[in-house]
Image: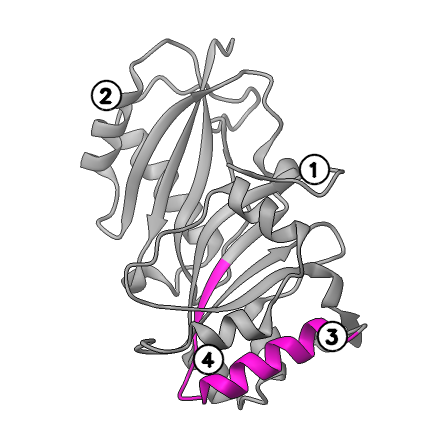
Amino acid sequence: MRTIGKLRVKYSKKEPLKFLSHLEVVSAIRQSVRRADLPVCFSEGFSPQLKISFGPPLAVGYTSDCEIFDMEMENRIDAELVKKRLVENTPEDLNVLSVSVVPLDVKAIELFINVSKYSIKLPNIDKEIIADKIKEFFDSKEFIIERLTDKSKREIDVRPLVITMKLAPLENSTDRVSSEINNDLKSQPYNIDAARSSLTGLVESKIEMLLRFGPGKTAKPDVIVQKLFNLSNEERLSLKINRDEIYHENEMGGIVLQ
């Protein structure tokens, strides 16, 4: 079946569904696409599957405003009509945000996306302590966390994976575009004096973290925060974490919004 076009769907995963696994979300999306009766290509073979590729898996327990998947189309169809059909056939808390046309030769999402921006709501920790701990993190040459599996335990230095981390207000803050992030990267990733001057008026504590990931180099923001602030496992599991945006970091260190 020949592919004549490709559409990218952006959707959110809200609080009621945050404990669904990536595979469960993928299954729900595939069922929604089938119900929407869209002209999506099928793979060949004994068990044809819809030709849909998904973005990087979201950890169980996280919410998101920036999940994406690409669909290979066998017929041309208006993107707004696709959005309407998906909205009508997708579970309530997997909200379809946009549908857009992407080039046929665009790289596979899982090979291209390598940076995520997270928001982490913290328990009651003094904001001066938060500011000091973040400065301490960026002043350090390494930040080692332990990764446990059923068979082994190994240490990972996550310091190179954290591009930026800052204390941020909760109320209706507007996400920065990629050009603003690149401007930040030209200076120090964290300014202690500027951070302290903005502490007044914060209702709760929230950290925004820009985190690299890729083959053999991944770290979960809740694990980083747990060690940085010496949280218990119970406190770590109670953290509210949202993936705000996903990006591509090029070889020159530039960050491009997807």
Image point (51%, 72%), residue name: 195
User: How crowded is the residue under tag 4: few (<14 C-alpha within 10 Å), some, or many (20+)?
Assistant: some
- Residue beneath disc 3: 139
Q: Which mark is residue 81?
A: 2
Q: 73 or 200: which is nearer to us?
A: 200
* Mark 2 residue crowding within 10 angstroms, few (<14) / some (14–19) / many (20+): few
Query: The disc labelled 3 sits on which kind of residue?
Result: Asp
Q: Earlier in the sequence, mark 1 or mark 4?
A: 4
Return the x and y of residue 43 as percentages of the image width and height.
Answer: 53, 22
Q: Which residues are magenta?
A: 118-140
Left or right of residue 200: residue 60: right
The reply to whether callout 2 and callout 1 are in contact (CB within 8 Å) is no
Judged from the image, the secondary structure of the residue bearing numbered disc 3 is: helix
**Image quadrant in which you'd find residue 238:** bottom left
Which residue in the structure is indicated by mark 1?
A: 250
Q: Tag 2's secondary structure?
A: helix
Q: Residue at label 4? A: 237
Marks 2 and 1: which is nearer the front?
1
Disc 4 marks a residue whose amino acid type is Leu
Q: Are marks 3 and 4 in contact (CB under 8 Å)?
A: no
Q: Which mark is residue 63?
A: none
